[in-house]
Structure formats: C-alpha cells, structure tokens
Image: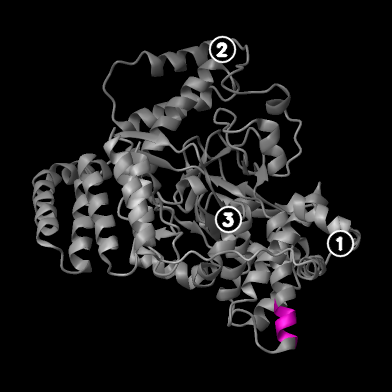
C-alpha cells in the first residue's frame, strides 16, 4: 500500500521535503508533513465501515454449517464466531449463531462450553419450541458427561505443573514483575538487568503482563482481543464486527483502555499490519491513562534514552507505570526506511481519529499540540520499541493434544522489551496469553546480564533467521548465526563421560517418576550439558524440557482450540 503512495507523492514533488525531515529528531514534523501531503493530494480512500447486519450473520452461519458438515471444525468455529459478531443485539440471528456453535462444541465433546452457549441462547430471549427443545436435550446430554472432565481438570491443576507459573515468590519492589533474583545496574551510562545470585536452569525469574498486545489475524476469531485467551465461548464487541472477548470483564477493560476509541476506526485498523495496530492502541492507551491531554503532551516532549537517564528504575521497567513505554534506547541502525513507513501510517491513523468528535481537544491550539504529541509517541514506539513474539500453547479439544501455536501474537513489555538480545540467551520467553514468563534455560552466574532472544530459541525458529533478525533490527555475527545452529545442523561434539552418564540417566530410566522429579532431572542434566549446545543430545534434552513446559503453560492458561 505504501509503495504506491510513495510513487504518487514523488511524482507530485512531496517526497523530497519529507526525506529532508527524516534527519530531524522531532518525528511529529514528519507526520504532520505526511498528513498534509496525503490530504492535499486526496490520497485517502473512503473506507466502508462494517456494521452489524443479520443477513450477513446468516451468510456466515451457512458457511459454518458447510464446514461443519465436512468435519472442518476449525473453520466452522471461525464462521460461527463471525456470525455472532455480525448479528444485531438480541436478534434471532445472534441466537442461531450461539446455537450452531453449541452444536459444534457438543460434537468435539467440549461439554462445559456447549452448556455456556446454550445458556446464552436462552438468556437472549424466547426461542421457538423446536429450537428450545433441541437446546434443552443437548444441555441435558452435556450435564451427564461433564463431571468427568471437571474432575480431570481439578486433578491436573493440583499438581507441580498446575502451580508452576503461579510465581508465588518475593518480588523486586522496583520491578514488580521480576523476582529478587533480578536487579538493574548501570554500566558505562547504560542500564542492564543482572542476576543477583546464581540461577539454575528451570527457575522462573519474571512474569510480566504486556503494556499492549495484538492478536495475529490468524487468531482474531479464536482468542480474546484483550487477554488473548483461546476460548470457546467468545462474546462479540457491542459495536464493531471485528473483535471478541472471553468475558464481560475483559470487554470492559479493553474498552476502557483503548477499544472505545479504536472501535470507531476499525475499518482503518483492518487495513494495516499488526505492528501498526499495536502502535495505535498503545498510544491510545497511554493517552487514556494520562489524566489529561496536557499531561500526555508534556510527556511526549521527553522520550527515549534522555528520559531513561532521568527516570527511576520503577519508572523505566514497571508496566504499571503509564509512561514506562517512553523509556527506550533510540540508537538505531536502518532507521530511515522504518521511520518513513511509521510516519505515513501514523498520519493515516490521525486522519481517521480526527473524524471522531471527541478524541482530540476542541480548542485549536491544544488540538494542534495534541496531534503533534500523538504523532511523536506513536512513531517513536513504532520505530524504536522492540516487539516480543508471544507464542502460546493450546490444547486441541478434539484430540487432547497440547501444542505450541505456530502463529505468534505480539506485544510490548516494559521490562522484557528492554533486555539485551542474545541468540544463545540465558532466558527463554514463554507465552501466557497476554503475559510472558522468563525462565532460565542455561545456568546463570551472579552478576551475569540477563538476555533473551527476540527471534526465539535457535531450536524453535519459526522464520528464516536473517529475516527475523532484520525485522527486529538486530545485527548479529555470533556463533549461533555464523555456524547456523538449528535442528537441521547439529554441532559435531563428543560428550564427556559425565555428560554421557547424565544423558543415560534421563533416556534409560525406567523408574516411574512424578513430573516434578522428571523436570528437575532434565534441568540438572541441562546444567551438566551447558558446554555442549546445539548437539543432538542437548536438543533431546531441550525437547523434553519444552514438552513439559508447554504442558505447564496450558495448565496455567487453560487455552483450548480446535484442530
């Protein structure tokens, strides 16, 4: 989309001025110039706003029925959710959407979720006799089968794995998401997170909620827009036809933080990438957290490394601090291309937000300052703040298989997003819906800097490595990159006698073990093999470690999906 706009503006002589402005530190000037150019050349396309419509809902429900009859249950679930999203309030179309989804849930034996949808149907209003009879019979069948599943869930959650991510430890008062194992020190004018004491493999050191996060479009009709929980009983936004929630609580929180404003420009939001959507909602959230436009405008004047030098550890790293996202290292390579793209996307967002009657201030002077502040914050976040991939686990209800989702959501985190990158990081990032956990994947010595890989562990690469590094603006020539460590190319290294003995104790053990003992044994073995990374044996250990952790992740999140 942007390439065509650039060509159009270049032919009309606007891009030269914009390129000159790219060299300035005040990004708002670039955005204002881009907005002016787009307005004068009438590049903006009038986008059609999709509203609730029962006929459209019926069309989606019919597509869901076709997928259901072909046993394509995942697609059927998506279509039924679309039908629910598009139906008008308390309409027959809405009731039929929930009814058909309940039939799907009954088929895959998700009995509790099926009952929830049936109850929703009855709460909407009176049903015709045949529909009511069918729903009542389905509910009775579910209730006879549900107690077994409930008992199994209770048993699983009362285990070591079920409580693994509860993180009931004493926290660092300056960084509430982190344990007392973590501290911040200054080195050559730079802040870094370090280990206060030796940390063993498998130790959880932080559990952080995202400041802002964004579902991948693949997960849009599968998970809650706010908390990112994969859930069978999603409910629709009251106004738009694009987002769903797992509960009224999440709906209210999402609306309060950003969606009340975002909802009115969803016709624009759907046409941009997930990274741009993330920048829009993070900036709206920050503005809403401020007590006034004046506070937001003042905050926008001090962004990046300069703000970090003047701020406390808590102001920099605590996600509950509304301005923590304005603290970041803005020394960036390859800045201009990214800056130009971010400036035009911000200009487009402002164009649509200006159409909202009460978003920006009414008084002209304050209105201009507010637009400049919004532009400055959104562009800086989009250009400089590093996105974290959030890879969740889900249990496929129709197979009982727990697996890591191949498609990652993204988020911005006040603490984790400022950690140093290492391709052979000592911390592993684990997705817990709209949170992430940081767990030691290598033994960490007292004083060592804490590191994560922004592109994932080298055994878990989801994309070609050079592309992933470039996307995160990372230049790297470490041995992981140069030697191309991966599951496709193991290092040729002979294990020592101690390492071989440790591996044998894991692989050849036939004694029944609890998951707690097995997990501890794997972690101890990974410590012994810490000097044999990227070997076939080390990968075997990592695979076992990840398999157990994935199961624990799912016990914590209770995510369910359909294969």
Element on which disc 3 rests? loop
In this figure, which residue is indicated by the disc labeled 1?
A: 18
Q: Earlier in the sequence, mark 2 or mark 1?
A: 1
Q: Position of residue 535 (x, y in %)?
A: 57, 17
Q: Position of residue 154 (x, y in %)?
A: 21, 46
Asked if residue 445 lies left or right of residue 117, the reply is right
Identify the magenta region. Answer: 365-370
**Few, some or many residues within 10 Å of mark 3 (<14, 14–19, 20+):** many
Residue 248 visible in rendering: yes
- Of labels 1 and 3, the one closer to you: 1
Label for residue 495? 2
Q: Residue at x 65, y 76 (%)?
A: 354
Asked if residue 335 lies left or right of residue 370, the reply is right
Q: Is residue 13 above or below residue 454?
A: below
Element on which disc 1 rests? helix
Tell how many labels: 3
Q: Position of residue 106 (x, y in %)?
A: 20, 44
Q: Residue at x 17, y 64 (%)?
A: 122
Q: Is residue 74 above or below residue 223?
A: above
Q: Earlier in the sequence, mark 3 or mark 2?
A: 3
């Amino acid at each position: 989309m942007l390439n065509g706009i650039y060509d159009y503006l270049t032919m009309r002589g606007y891009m030269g001025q914009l390129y000159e402005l790219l060299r300035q530190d005040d990004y708002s000037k670039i955005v204002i110039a881009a907005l002016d150019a787009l307005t004068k050349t009438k590049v903006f396309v009038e986008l059609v706003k999709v509203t609730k419509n029962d006929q459209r809902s019926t069309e989606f429900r019919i597509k869901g029925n076709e997928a259901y009859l072909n046993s394509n249950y995942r697609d059927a679930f998506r279509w039924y959710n679309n039908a629910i999203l598009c139906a008008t309030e308390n309409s027959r179309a809405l009731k039929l959407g929930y009814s058909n989804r309940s039939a799907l849930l009954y088929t895959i034996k998700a009995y509790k979720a099926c009952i929830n949808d049936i109850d929703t149907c009855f709460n909407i209003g009176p049903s015709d006799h045949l529909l009511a009879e069918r729903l009542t019979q389905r509910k009775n069948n579910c209730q006879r089968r549900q107690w077994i599943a409930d008992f199994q869930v209770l048993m699983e959650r009362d285990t070591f794995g079920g409580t693994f991510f509860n993180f009931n430890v004493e926290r660092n008062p300056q960084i509430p998401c982190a344990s007392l194992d973590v501290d911040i020190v200054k080195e050559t004018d730079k802040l870094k997170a370090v280990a206060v004491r030796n940390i063993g493999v498998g130790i959880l050191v932080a559990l952080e909620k995202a400041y802002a996060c964004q579902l991948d479009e693949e997960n849009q009709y599968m998970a809650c827009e706010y908390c990112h929980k994969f859930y069978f009983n999603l409910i629709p936004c009251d106004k738009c036809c694009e987002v769903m929630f797992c509960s009224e609580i999440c709906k209210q929180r999402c609306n309060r933080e950003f969606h009340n404003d975002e909802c009115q420009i969803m016709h624009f939001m759907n046409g941009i990438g997930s990274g741009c959507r993330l920048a829009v909602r993070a900036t709206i959230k920050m503005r809403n957290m401020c007590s006034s436009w004046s506070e937001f405008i003042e905050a926008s004047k001090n962004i990046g490394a300069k703000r970090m030098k003047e701020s406390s550890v808590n102001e920099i790293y605590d996600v509950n601090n509304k301005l923590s996202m304005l603290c970041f290292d803005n020394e960036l390579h390859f800045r201009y291309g990214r800056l130009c793209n971010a400036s035009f996307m911000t200009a487009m967002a402002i164009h649509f937000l200006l159409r909202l009657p009460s978003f920006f201030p009414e008084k002209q002077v304050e209105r201009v300052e507010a637009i400049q502040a919004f532009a400055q914050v959104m562009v800086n976040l989009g250009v400089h703040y590093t996105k974290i991939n959030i890879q969740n686990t889900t249990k496929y209800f129709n197979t009982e298989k727990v697996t890591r989702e191949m498609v990652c959501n993204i988020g911005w985190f006040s603490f984790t997003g400022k950690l140093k990158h290492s391709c052979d990081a000592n911390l592993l990032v684990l997705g817990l819906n709209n949170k992430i956990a940081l767990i030691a994947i290598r033994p960490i010595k007292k004083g060592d800097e804490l590191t994560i890989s922004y592109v994932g562990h080298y055994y878990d690469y989801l994309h070609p490595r050079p592309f992933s590094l470039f996307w995160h603006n990372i230049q790297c020539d470490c041995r992981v990159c140069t030697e191309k460590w991966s599951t496709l190319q193991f290092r040729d290294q002979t294990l020592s006698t101690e390492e071989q003995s440790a591996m044998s104790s894991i692989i050849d053990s036939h004694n029944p073990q609890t998951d707690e003992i097995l997990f501890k044994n794997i972690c101890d073995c990974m410590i012994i093999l810490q000097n044999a990374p990227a070997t076939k044996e080390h990968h075997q250990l990592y695979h076992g470690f990840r398999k157990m952790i994935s199961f624990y992740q799912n016990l914590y999140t209770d995510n369910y999906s359909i294969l």
